[in-house]
Image: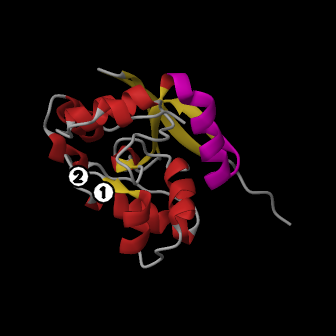
Amino acid sequence: MRATLPETFGLDRLRTPIGTALLVSDADGVLRALDWEDCEPRMKALLRRQYGTVVLKAARAPVETRAALAGYFKGELDRLNEIHWRVAGTPFQRKVWNALPKIPPGATMSYGELAAKLDVPKAMRAVGHANGANPLSVVVPCHRLIGANGALVKYGGGIERKRWLLEHEGVVLRRSSDRAQ
């Protein structure tokens, strides 16, 4: 049996208003992960689950990716659509991750609503687990999923980042109903 070589990805850092983002790109310049510097161990674990052994080498992300992200953080919310990304994951995870960018900036959806849209109305928890395994924070906008009661629940980068992202996109939040899990 032949041993598989580890995947090698480039790792770049981008300052944003909510912390330093880690940008992981492949040799083709396609974004494979975006997470926060203070969440680097979680990001590495997600990459291992998807790709096995991964080698991260310091490398600049494509100019177009950096520009699109900078534009998003300056208020040009549709710039996320310009970013080329690719994920591994299970077929169900990919189904969830491909559905998330269809939730427009300024809108939110509950886990149950997304499960219903995916024709698996009883799979709210599975949608939640897939959402939590999303390796592409912001770009695959897992922050747009909220609790059925409108509360902010679970975000790998922290509830305060989720709150900032949603408010940045124009979502009006009821602070009294928010709860961190």
Viewport quadrant of the N terminus:
bottom right
Q: Percent position (x, y) of residue 126?
A: 57, 63
Please give left or right for residue 3 compared with residue 106 in the image: right
Given residues 60 and 34, the one toward you in this image is: 34
Q: Percent position (x, y) of residue 132?
A: 53, 48
Q: Amino acid at mark 2?
A: Asn
Residues in magenta, as a range: 38-54
Given residues 109 and 143, the one toward you in this image is: 109
- Name the residue: 70% across, 46% down: 53
Relative vertical location of residue 62 with respect to residue 128 in this rendering, above or below: above
Q: Are discs 2 and 1 less than 8 Å apart at CB?
A: yes
Is 39 within the magenta?
yes
Q: Percent position (x, y) of residue 169?
A: 20, 39
What secondary structure do most residues of the magenta stretch adopt?
helix
Residue 101, label in figure:
1
Residue 9, label in figure:
none
Please give left or right for residue 16 compared with residue 170 in the image: right
Among the two numbered marks 2 and 1 on one chain, the one whose residue lies closer to the N terminus: 2
Q: Residues within 10 Å of mark 1 (few under 14, many from 20)?
A: some
Relative vertical location of residue 76 with respect to residue 127 in this rendering, above or below: above
- Name the residue: 71% across, 51% down: 5
Q: Which residue is mark 2?
A: 81
